[in-house]
Image: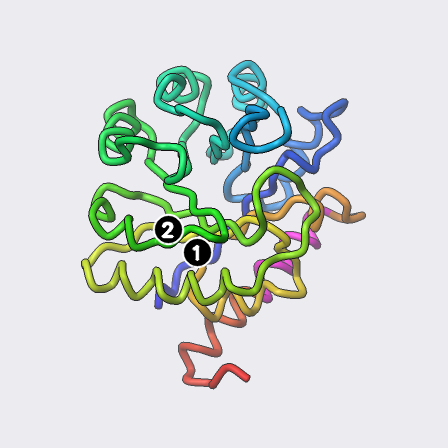
Amino acid sequence: MSTSRIKIAPSILAADFGRLAEEVVAVERSGADYIHVDVMDGCFVPQITIGQPVVEAVKACSNTPLDVHLMIVDPDRYLESFVEAGAAVLTVHLEACTHLHRTLATIRSLGARAGVALNPATSFEQLRWVIEEVDLVLVMSVNPGFGGQKFIDSALRKVDALRALCAQHGVFPEIEVDGGVSAKNAEAFGRVGVDVLVAGTAIFRAADYAQAIDEIRAKAQLGRTLVDQGVEVV
């Protein structure tokens, strides 16, 4: 299992949009590794959130890489514009892509890292045929579309099995989890090998952003350390 520091990606979906620039700067100063941006179109998921102009505005006030998650149908139409707006990582949903290999290749050709997201009921087996083209796999631990949901336990088993698949192919994309992440379950995610934890309300509803980020990271890092030391999961 990787010994690198587990990354924390605050999701601005939970931020105060009336003070968005201040919120982004605050989590950046508090130790965020990515700024996670959820783009929703009202079709692939029920809500409509933000588009390229907001991504561009966030990029203008932040030096932290933008982790842009496209929860939209036909994402190929917008890949170039989101990379131009500032996406460092651009993640599309497997379920939304007709030609996933081509989509991933396009993202990479535009200079961004290519991510694939999996809904809770979606198998990762289809990734077997494109895993060498993937820089990040986002495992949804809630059904996408709303913040503040309780995480779905089966995501832990999916991450564990996904890590094994990647090892079989000799590739090691970052594995990210999004949905219901908090200090209460971060240790469990660390145990199964998560590299990046997306957290929204657990950070933006905290009184101290730095303390919230540090606590989530520390719990996840503890889980990873216990596994490395051979401590069995109870």
User: Residue 44: x, y in percent?
Assistant: 51, 31
Q: Position of residue 18 (x, y in %)?
A: 76, 22
Mark 1 crowdedness (10 Å alpha carbons): few <14, some 14-19, many ≥20: many
Q: Position of residue 224 (x, y in %)?
A: 46, 70
User: In the rendered view, does 115 fall on the left or right side of 37?
Assistant: left
Q: Which colour scheme appears in the figure? A: rainbow
Q: Considering only vertical position in the picture, is 142 above or below 218?
A: above
Q: Nearer the viewer, residue 174 or 212?
A: 174
> Badge 2, how many Cα within 10 Å: few under 14, some, many 20+?
some
User: Badge 1 is on which residue?
Assistant: 195
| Residue at mark 2 | 174
Helix, strand, or loop for circle 1?
Answer: loop
- State if disc 2 and disc 1 touch (CB < 8 Å): yes
Q: Quadrant of the N terminus?
A: bottom left
* Residue 48, image quadrant: top right
Left or right of residue 54, residue 174 in this image: left
Kind of residue at badge 2: Glu
Say left or right for 85 vs 50: left
Q: Residue at x 35, y 22 (%)?
A: 76
Query: Quadrant of the rendered structure where residue 115 is?
Result: top left
Give the magenta-colored segment's residue range.
209-219
At x 51%, y 17%, the residue is 52
Choose top left, top right, bottom left or bottom right for residue 26: top right
Q: In terms of sequence position, does the residue under pointer 1 or pointer 2 come before the other?
A: 2
- Count the marks: 2
Q: Where does the image place residue 131, in percent across and percent down from the top left? A: 24, 48
Q: Dot 2 lies on which element?
A: strand
In the displayed structure, would residue 180 be above or below residue 27?
Answer: below
- Looking at the magenta stretch, what is its main secondary structure? helix
